[in-house]
Image (spheres, grey):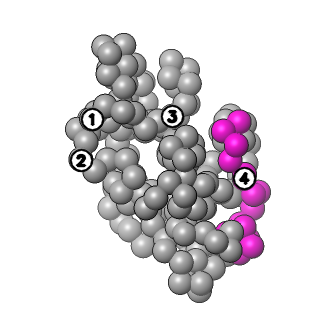
Amino acid sequence: MSAKTRYHFTGICGTAMGAVAAAMKQRGYIVTGSDASVYPPMSDFLRGQGIEIAEGYREENIPADADVVVIGNAISRGNPEAEAALDRKLLYQSLPEVMKECFLRGKRNFIVSGTHGKTTTSSMLAWLLRHAGRDPGFMIGGLPKNLGRGGYFGDSDFNVLEGDEYDTAFFDKRSK
């Protein structure tokens, strides 16, 4: 997809969804989103990135010219936006699908997994690579203070990702 591709994130205020949405906006993609729970710090961060957020889920939240609807793992069938994407025959993808296409392909990806400390360890690894003269991309399920954001497209061939064992979406049961 080109940088002019319009993405709508249904469930944008989740930490991973918000991080990816902001990184895509930074990269030049057109990004909008919606969520039932719009509150700081993620809502402030996303709005600070110039991303329009609709509160609540409604069919009309999806722009008429949307190219892709990214459906978060908290969204199930019956959600007005999920149903609108299906009815309008829009391309819809899970967050990992979008990450693979726009962020991970052709890179060296470090994935931090485990029960506790994933966000801290991922943040430290990205910070270390950055201070070693690399410009790593990173997708972290939080807003790490040492990096200023949870998602970033770097110019090096390194990415740091916080792994997540939860299933991805109602239509994609792979882990994030």
In the picture provided, is 169 more to the left or to the right than 36? left
Residues under labels 3 and 1: Cα distance?
18 Å
Q: Is residue 160 magenta-colored?
A: no
Give the extent of the magenta segment. Answer: 48-62
Q: Which mark is residue 53?
A: 4
In the picture provided, is 13 more to the left or to the right than 59? left
Label 3 Cα crowd, 10 Å radius (few <14 / some 14-19 / many 20+): many
Q: Quadrant of the N terminus?
A: bottom left
Residues under labels 4 and 2: Cα distance?
31 Å
Q: Where, by quadrant of the figure, is residue 69 drawn?
A: bottom right
Residue 77 drawn at (x, y percent): 55, 76
70 versus 27 height, above or below:
below
Residue 163 can be seen in this image: yes
> Which comes sooner in the sequence, label 3 or label 1?
3
Residue 96 drawn at (x, y percent): 38, 56
> Which SS class for mark 2?
loop
Residues under labels 1 and 2: Cα distance?
8 Å
Residue depicted at 53% across the width and 78% down the height: 90
Type of residue at label 1? Asp
3 or 1: mark nearer the eye: 1
> Which SS class for mark 1?
loop
Type of residue at label 2? Gly
Disc 1: which residue:
157
